[in-house]
Image (cartoon, rainbow, N blue to C red):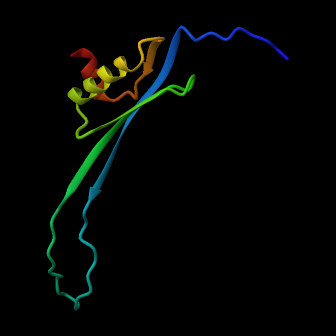
Amino acid sequence: MLQSDTKLPLANLYFQDESRFGLFTRNGKALTAKGVKPICPFHQVFKTLYLFGAFSPIDGDQLLLEMPHCNADNFQVFLNAFSLQRKRPTKCMLLAGIALCLFAIKA
């Protein structure tokens, strides 16, 4: 049996990404006579939410936030919540590479 002194790492690595989930109503097909356009009530609805997440493969630590929009302000809220989650160890986050990440970092 090997014995080792396991210590917490000086830095923890996280991978970040965001996803959009939503509902989009579509008008389906209807049976009508040839050349007759179907008439039916239809209301266009498109509702979404964005899920922002950061996961560490090192120790399994994670943060998930549901946001109504994907913009720089909401990404900053995510970064603020991420920074408050655990003070130690130092965090290193690999971003998904989308434009809003770069915009939020510049602000």
In the drawing, does residue 72 fall left or right of residue 79? left
Question: Toward which corner of the image does residue 57 lie, by quadrant?
Answer: top right
89 or 93: which is nearer to us? 89
Against 5, residue 49 (above or below) is below
Above or below 38: residue 15: above
* Residue 104, horizontal then vertical, whole percent: 25, 21
Q: What's the residue at 24%, 15% (across, down)?
A: 106
The image position of residue 78, as x and y in percent, is 31, 27
Please tell me in which quadrant of the rendered image residue 80 appears.
top left
**Residue at left offset 82%, top offset 14%:** 2
Nearest the camera: 29 or 84?
A: 84
Instruction: Give the position of the C terminus as an image quadrant.
Output: top left
The quadrant of the rendering that contains the N terminus is top right
Vertical comparison of 107 with 27: above or below:
above
Specify the farthest residue to the bottom: 33
Of 2 and 41, nearer the camera is 2
> Residue at left 26%, top 48%?
48
Number of numbered discs present?
0
Residue at (23, 32) in percent of width and height: 71
Residue 32: give x, y in percent of width and height.
Answer: 23, 88
Q: Residue furthest right?
A: 1
Residue 18 versus residue 49 in the image, above or below: above
List x then y, in percent, for residue 38.
Answer: 18, 82
